[in-house]
Each structure stands twice: as structure tokens, then as C-alpha cells.
Amino acid sequence: MSTETIDLRTKLITDFHARESVMNGEAKSAFHQKKRAAFTQFETLGFPTPKNEEWKYSNVRDLISASYNFNTSDTLSAEDLIDLKMPEQAANILYFVNGHYNPALSTVVSSTDQIIIDSLQNAYKNNPDLVNSYFDELVKNDSDAFTSLNTAFAHDGVFIYVPNNQTVEHPVILRFVSDARVENVASQPRNIIAVGKNAHVKIAEAFRTIGDERSFTNVVTEINVGEEAGVEYYKVQNESENAYHIGTTQVRMLEKSHFYAATVTLNGKFTRNNLNIVIDGEHCEAHMYGLYFPDGTQHVDNHTVADHSKPNSESNELYKGILRDKSKGVFNGKIFVRPDAQKTNAFQSCKNIVLSNDATMYTKPQLEIFADDVKCSHGTTTGQIDEEALFYMRSRGISKAEAMSLLMFAFCADVVSQIKIDSIREYLENVIAEKLSRK
Amino acid sequence: MLSINGLRASIDGKEILKGINLEIKPGEVHAIMGPNGSGKSTLASVLAGREEYEVTAGTVTFDGKDLLELAAEQRAAEGIFLAFQYPVEIPGVTTINFLKTAVNEIRKYNGEEPLDAARFLKMVREKAKLVSMNDSLLKRALNEGFSGGEKKRNEIFQMAVLEPKLAILDETDSGLDIDALRIVAEGVNSLRSPERSAIVVTHYQRLLDYIVPDFVHVLYKGRIVKSGGKELAFELEEKGYDWIKAEVEAQEVN
């Protein structure tokens, strides 16, 4: 372990104690006690090294070797956002700048009977018991240092609560902007989403960067999907060449609920996404789609878990990647079928196109099945563009470059077409087309 | 229109074409027949620009241009069309979008403005009717899940849309029942004109009942060993290829 590593860890430990020392009575709250427990776990775990099986191909040494400002003030104005060309949409749009909620940039259009959308900070101030009842209830702090770190420092993010039987017409779009124009910045947003019985909502998290300095985002989102509820959740990453991103989305599904996730990573220096779904009810459907398109020396790691603990549910997973230049991709998909989870259907597929000899894709499906009456399958493919398809298209007058673009766009479309928020889907199509036209 | 002289080509170091000479004038339909493995499909592939084949000798001139210098897409833009023996399935790209890209890429090559959506659609619908192609197939991913007959029909439909000067049909009849064969042949015949030519590669005489050729050539061991009129095809149908093989072998001995 290098001395820098100790530095970031020591700095965070010092920070935590400094924060705690000015908390007065709040330090005794149940909310803070959860943070304190997570902090202790972080102290024990330390940052992972490649010796840790879960981090074998994703080395965070570079990420933790720099120093970051974790306590920036929010300085962003609407004008600063113009260059990011964020798509417009009639939606609830919330901005978080370096992790802080920015009310001036944000718009909430849905009524409060339908949905409560607030910053975690405000929500906790207004309704501490409600927030606390969902905070840190789903994640596991004892196995992942970044999650425990996020819990320990949880300060802001979004709190979304959809009461029973509400179908929220307008989507919720959360835009996390790292403002790295002046210095290395870090943020640790914590999002809590609770969707009641038979309630339906679409939520997107979009991650962007302004500026060329380093940004480090360590985000955790907890999603409670109530009985018969339907949640569509999209995570979109189009960050800078200097952006480090670690994220965990932890989901719990109850009886007869549906959950759709799409995770799309188009740009960022180093990305690690954990998507963990616990299917804790019968007759549930969980769908996980992923797309990653790294180039240069970018690194994208997707770890997913579909944990079937009750019978008669289905999970279905499709991750796709295009890797160029010297980029690296990692896919680790775990499926657990617990002893009670008879009649489970669980499918997983990971397909990759590797366009350069210097690019690498590591795939690892991991199925652990403890029930006997189940249908499970998995498959991974890693290859080049289909030469026969390419020649077919060229023989019709389509140039090689255009044919490659069409084929790769089609490859991505399987995932992108799953996104049911029009502006986000169209935005992604544009960014992908632009990336494809770049050599 | 097309002039092939002393064409030799190999794949993976193995010579398949061993000196082909062929002259095709505007409006002519030439059938290339021959036993399996004689090099028929190789000839079609080399003309269309498949890169796995290495041309080791000879020239191919198309409308005064050195065809061998052109990439596959340039050949298509110059007016060469290959109907594939095994059309490729391309998931995620609809037939209509694929063709629109092809039409506009060819127009760009020839210095023309792209077709607007309305005119393109009108043209495509007319051509689809020509080969009895169902509109619903146009919106589906290219050839994905198409039956053998639908795939071949799609080839002829694409040919109708792109209106090539020289169409090369590579065993388009293989795997077709008689009804599909008739529809495909009608599509091809409707495109015949004094300016357009075709090379029909086939193993059997059957297709030539519907697409009547001006000339028939027999390809064997990488060479055209016999040429004649359409009656040669009937002779082959009746007598098979053995007598031709025997003739060639007798010459080789001498």
C-alpha cells in the first residue's frame, strides 16, 4: 500500500471525526448511529486492492492516490450548464452540484400528492423518522468500503417517496454535475427511493462533469419497490476523461413488483457500477440492461447481482459493450437462487465487441443455485464486428465506416431502446452516433 | 460493359480461378453453370469485391474502369449488384433503413442529392410490389428470422431498388420452392433492359426456364471450359457434367 493511499483514508477519518465533533445532540440520533457504524466498517475494510476478488480487474490505486476537495461550495449557474447540452423534457429535474442539491437550477412539476421529491437534507429536516426508516436499510456496509464510506458521510442526495397507488406521469431526472473547473472534487450523493404499493415511477440518474480537473463520485442509491409497484430506473454516465465514478444501486423488490434498470456508461476515466437486486417477493420481474462504450484508456466495470430469495420470480439481464483503443471492460454477473426460490427463471447475457487488439474485456458470470426446480441460463460473447455483415452492407454501396456505424448503433439499440424517457433515449442515441462518427 | 481477361484468384493460398475470360455486353444475360467447387461463387465474390480473395493475375474492366481497383462499396455505386447465395441477417437494422442508407450513399458517390423520405418510400413501395414483398418485412430487422424464400426475395427487392447495371445472382435458386422461384425470376425479368446485364450463377438448369440467358458458360476447375447458347443448359440438364469433365481431362492428358 502506497503512502498516498493512507493519506486519503487518514484524511477521511479525520474529516469524519471533525464533522462528528460539531454535531452536538444530533450525534446521538439513530440516523447518525447508522453512519457511525458504517464508518467503523470503512475503517476496518480500507480501500479494496486487486487481491479482493470483487476488485480483481479494477484497481482503485489511481483513484485514491489523488487528493480531492470533499467540501466544495455550489457555484454553478444555469449558464454554466449550456455547454453540457442537457436534453429538455417536461419532467421533475433536480440538480446536484458536487453532491449538493441546487434548488435554483431544479424544477419539480409533479404534485406532492403523487410524489414527494426533496433533497435528502431537507427531507430529513422535515421528516426525520420517515427518512430514517429507509436510510441504510438495504445496503451492506460490511463488504464494500465505498458503500460504507458513502453511508458514513451521507449528507445530501435525493429522497423520493411515491405513496401507494400513485402513477407518476412525469419522470424524475436527477442530474449530478461535478464542477471540476478549479480543483479535484469529490462528492458522495446518497439517494433514497421508496415506491409504495401499486405505485409507478420512472427515475433517471445522469452524471456529467464540467472542467478538466479530477472528479470522484461515490454514489449510493437505495430503491424500495413496493408490492405490485413498477419502477424504471436509468443510470446514464457521460463524464469527463478525468472522472472517477463508483456507484452502488441497491434494490429490494416485494411481491408482484416490476423493476427495470438500464445502466449506460459512455464516458469516464474509471467507472464501477454495482447493481444489486434482492427479489424478496413472488411473481416479480427484474430486468437489467447495460451498455458501455469506453475508448482511450477508459475503464468500465459492471457488477450485478440478482438475488432470488422467493419462488416464482424472473430476472433477465442483457449487458452489451463496445471497446475501443486501450480501454478495459469488466462484467461480473451474479445470480443467486436461494433454497426457497423454486420456479425461478433467471437469464443473463453479456455481449461485447472489441474493436482493438489493445482493448480487453473480462467477463465472469457467477451462478449459485440452491433450489432444484429453476430455469437459469447465462452466456457471454466477445468478438469483432461481423465481417460477413460488413461485406453485405458494403456490397450495397454503404461505405465501410458507415456500415460499421450502422452495425454498432444497432448493437447499442437493444439496450438504448429500453429507455422509456424520450429525451434521455434521444440524447443517448445522439451521443452514441457522435462517438461512432469519431475515429 | 464487363470485360474479364485472364483472371486468376486464390483464397488462403489456394488458387480457385485459373484464368477466366468473359465479355458481357449491355443487355445480355450470361449463365454460369458448373459442378460444385468449380469456382462459380468465387467468381461472383471476386467481381463484387470480397476481400478474402486475392487476385493474382488478370484484369477486370467495368464500363471502362479498372474494377479491381475499387472497394466493394465503390463497385456497388458504379452499378454492380451481388445477390447473395446466403443473405446475411443483420439484427437491429431495418431493411428500410438499410436500403435508405445504401441508396443515399450511392447517390452521394455519384454526386446526387439524397432522396427525401417521401420519394424514397414511394419508390420502395413500388419495388416491393414488383417482387410481392410484404410491407411488414421492410420494417423488420434485415433478414432476421426471414425464411429462405423471404431472404432471396429480399435480395431481388434490393436489386430492384438499387437498379444495377450488372446484377450477379449467386445461386439465387438454391433452397427455393417453385413458387418462390417464379416470383424471384419475375422480379429479375422485370428489370431486364437493353442497358442492364446479368450474370446468373446456378448449378441447375431449372432457374434458366424462367430467366432465359443469352449465353451459357460452363466453369470447371477455375476455367470456362465451354460456352454456348441457352441450348447448352438443356444439354447439361440432360447429360450432367460428366461428359464435360471427361473432355477437360482428355485435354489435360494431351
Image (cartoon, coloured by chain):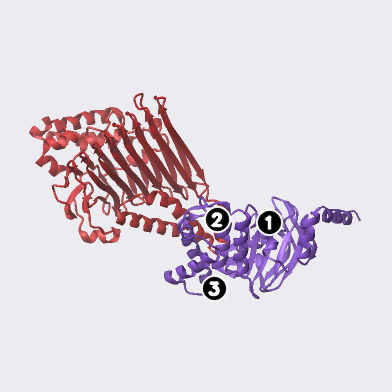
Residue A6 shows in this picture: no
Mark 1 Cα-neighbour bin, 10 Å: few <14, some 14–19, many ≥20: some
Amino acid carrying mark 2 in the image: Glu
Q: Does A111 appear above or below A65?
A: below
Tag 1 subunit? B
Q: Which mark is residue B150?
A: 2
Tag 3 subunit? B
- Image x and y of residue B157, in percent: 55, 63
**Residue A141 or residue A168, whichever sits in front:** A168
- Image x and y of residue B118, in percent: 42, 70
**Residue A4 or residue A21, whichever sits in front:** A21
Which numbered disc, 3 or 2, marks the residue closer to the eye? 2
Q: Which mark is residue B142?
A: none
Residue A104 shows in this picture: yes
What distance separates the C-alpha of mark 3 from that of mark 2? 30 Å
Indicate the chain coloured purple by its letter. Answer: B
Indicate the chain coloured red by its letter. Answer: A
Which numbered disc, 2 or 1, marks the residue closer to the eye? 2
The structure residue drawn at horizontal position 48% and vertical position 65%, both measured from the top left corner, is B100
Q: Which mark is residue B41?
A: 1
Mark 3 Cα-neighbour bin, 10 Å: few <14, some 14–19, many ≥20: few
**Residue B74 or residue A298, whichever sits in front:** B74
Q: Quadrant of residue A283?
A: top left
Q: Earlier in the sequence, mark 3 or mark 1?
A: 1
What distance separates the C-alpha of mark 3 from that of mark 1? 28 Å
The structure residue drawn at horizontal position 37% and vertical position 47%, both measured from the top left corner, is A269
Q: Does A48 appear above or below B20?
A: above
**Residue A282 or residue B53, whichever sits in front:** A282
Does residue A53 appear left or right of residue A422 in this picture?
A: right
Name the residue beneath numbered marker 3.
Answer: B110
